[in-house]
Image (tube, rainbow, N blue to C red):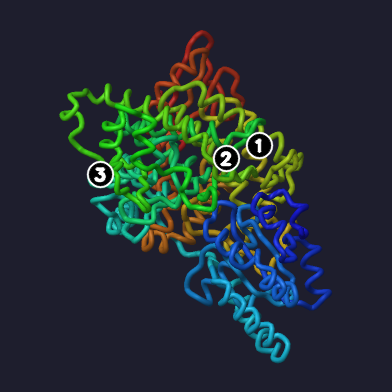
Amino acid sequence: MSNFLKYETSPYLLQHADNPVNWYAWNDKTLAKALAENKMMLISVGYAACHWCHVMAHESFEDEAVAAIMNEHFICVKVDREERPDVDQVYMDAAYLINGNGGWPLNALAMPDGKPFFAGTYYPSENWVRLLEYFADIYKNERSKLDEQAENLSKGIREMEKIPLNEEPVLFDENDLHELCNNLLKRVDWEDGGTMGNMKFPMPSVWEFLLQYHYFSGNKEVLKAVEVTLDNMSLGGIYDQVGGGFSRYATDTQWHVPHFEKMLYDNAQLVSLYSHAFQVTHNPLYKRIVYETLEFVSRELAHSEGGFYSSLDADSEGAEGKFYVWSLKEIQDILGEEAELYNSYFGITSKGNWEEQKNIPDINYGDKDLLEKYRLADDELQIRLKKMNDVLLSEREKRVRPGTDDKILTSWNCLMVTGFIDAYKAFGEQAFFDKAKRTLDFLLDKFCNEDNSVFRNYKNGNAGIPAFLDDYAFLISALLDFYQVSFEEKYLYKAKEIMDYVREHFFDKSSGMFFYTDDRFSNLIARKTETTDNVIPSSNSEMAKNLFILGMYFENNKYSMEAQQTLKNIKADAVKSPGYYSNWAQAMILQIYTPFEIAIVGEKWKERLIEFEKEFIPQAIFLGGENGTLPLLEDKLIPGKTMIYVCRNKTCAL
């Protein structure tokens, strides 16, 4: 038994290729089929590492009786939200408008033209069947009701996150940042770190903003908020204490019980965050976390050609977290005499610190007086723990591994490039530079076209889906970041060329913002604009930063004004709700504290640049080398000397 998903490359879609549901992928042919047969569409959205997606698949989509009802009344469409975030965004908006919340799995019902009339998340099999039969009856006997609901819902979707053009004069000053920061600090959990709530997400952009705010303000309370968060995350169960790397979120308030899937985008951003935090604090814990996380990414997510896979599943052998947890006896059998020290340090007990006598290694749950108890220096303790973790990691590799979502996504890989660059700057490790370059060159080779358009995904040697705004935004960012550590101008000029493509095909003149989809590949009921920052910064906030920085490099006032306009549009929302606008807040910093242009030219430019890179300097752009052609470098090279020039606001120091 198989369906049309067997022709796809997405691991998530392939997971459903043997369902009795007659699934189709989202494409023009499927949309035309729904119209031609005048059948409702059932659009089910998820991703490979989603636990509850698997549960619903097992309960409903693998059941022949349920599948028969779905096939009879609907054109059933499976969507990988990581490949098609544009589709996900439209139907997720429908779920929010109907229910006030959303999540995955996302299941939407739509008219043959794709306009939704209902959307929700997970449903037990019995409820799911009842819901499908209810709407099948209405579609047959009272279709006009669904037509009306679909029209109203589609109108609401088009209006959501629609940003008006702000033509009023707007100033950005330090008071805005102070208010924004104070509003953010009200949400901080000062005991366990993170923001207050029943679950904890890392939210790297929030803490990155606070690090930058601390740099300019010197506010020690702000730095404390960052440190308590980074400390508790890195010591808790959300961090894989055995193999390195972070899970997507914690299901409790103390970072103890993770939702065990590991995402590339989280780990990429957290490498950058911990690298920056090390530059500020020189805390050796942060260095260890960066190195271990990059070891995990390189060991378990690396593609042979240079890119990185998307994620690791939460489940293995049908159980969430089974790959990562331990019983006391397992550790005693593996480590022998060393087990007592290990168990004390990581909170391992016979009862278990999770469920069914299983333990999640968690330093916060361990004994706090080990150094005195075992008469060890901290360095000696860390060496012994490292050896024990290496042994456990080797044993863990013999278990059945969680599934790997082995598609390669442009935006997430660009975040990883930036992660390697930030780690290289903080620690001077040449291997980090080399991996950043290899990945970036891989992306430029496999994902980019001659007209500077870009693909989003890559699998089995093929790139297929046209890129979205986040792919372009983070690619431009990665190119800008790599230029600043290499001074290879081809990367900087490529960033400008791609920016000009985006301005031609994504820009919305009516709002001054950027649409999420390319005007050449938009076939949805609404062309959306992504503005709020979440676990990944929004594409528009990243574009605002890119426009500003490219405007400085190329002395392009149009770029600078466009960056300013996007910020004007969202300023009021950002100050009021900073948790959803933390990357915008970083863009605002660029407007308030104009960055320095630091040009380093001459044969020893690399040595001089490395000295700067050790420091956390969020208010500078770097340029230079020996053969630079940028107008900003004109007449700066002096034969036989290495010179450093510092300019700001179109004024240069001697």
The quadrant the N terminus occupies is bottom right
Q: How many C-alpha atoms fall within 10 Å of the one at disc 2: few (<14), some, or many (≥20)?
A: many
The answer to which of marks 1 and 2 sits earlier in the sequence is: 2
The residue that label 2 is drawn on is 414
Distance CA(mark 3)–CA(mark 2)? 29 Å
Q: Residue furthest bottom?
A: 141
Q: Which x, y percent locates residue 132?
A: 64, 78
Please report the residue visible at 30 percent of the width from the left and 31 percent of the height from the top. Answer: 283
Q: How many C-alpha atoms fall within 10 Å of the one at disc 1: few (<14), some, or many (≥20)?
A: many
| Residue 261 in the figure: left or right of residue 332 | right
| Residue 323 in the figure: left or right of residue 455 | left
Q: Nearer the viewer, residue 216 or 391?
A: 391
SS class of the residue under badge 2?
A: helix
Would you say the residues marked 3 and 1 are in contact, meaning their CB atoms lie under 8 Å apart? no
In which quadrant of the rendered view does residue 38 lie? bottom right
Q: Which x, y percent locates residue 7?
A: 78, 52
The numbered disc on residue 224 is 3
Would you say the residues marked 1 and 2 are in contact, meaning their CB atoms lie under 8 Å apart? yes
Q: How many C-alpha atoms fall within 10 Å of the one at disc 3: few (<14), some, or many (≥20)?
A: some
Task: Give amino acid for label 1.
Answer: Leu
SS class of the residue under badge 3?
A: helix
Res. 217 in view: no
The answer to which of marks 3 and 2 sits earlier in the sequence is: 3
Task: Give amino acid for label 2.
Answer: Cys
Distance CA(mark 1)–CA(mark 2)? 8 Å
The answer to which of marks 3 and 1 sits earlier in the sequence is: 3
The residue that label 1 is drawn on is 443
Please report the residue visible at 69 percent of the width from the left and 91 percent of the height from the top. Answer: 142
Q: Which x, y percent locates residue 367?
A: 22, 38
Q: Nearer the viewer, residue 75 or 527?
A: 75
Please report the residue visible at 32 percent of the width from the left and 42 percent of the height from the top. Answer: 362
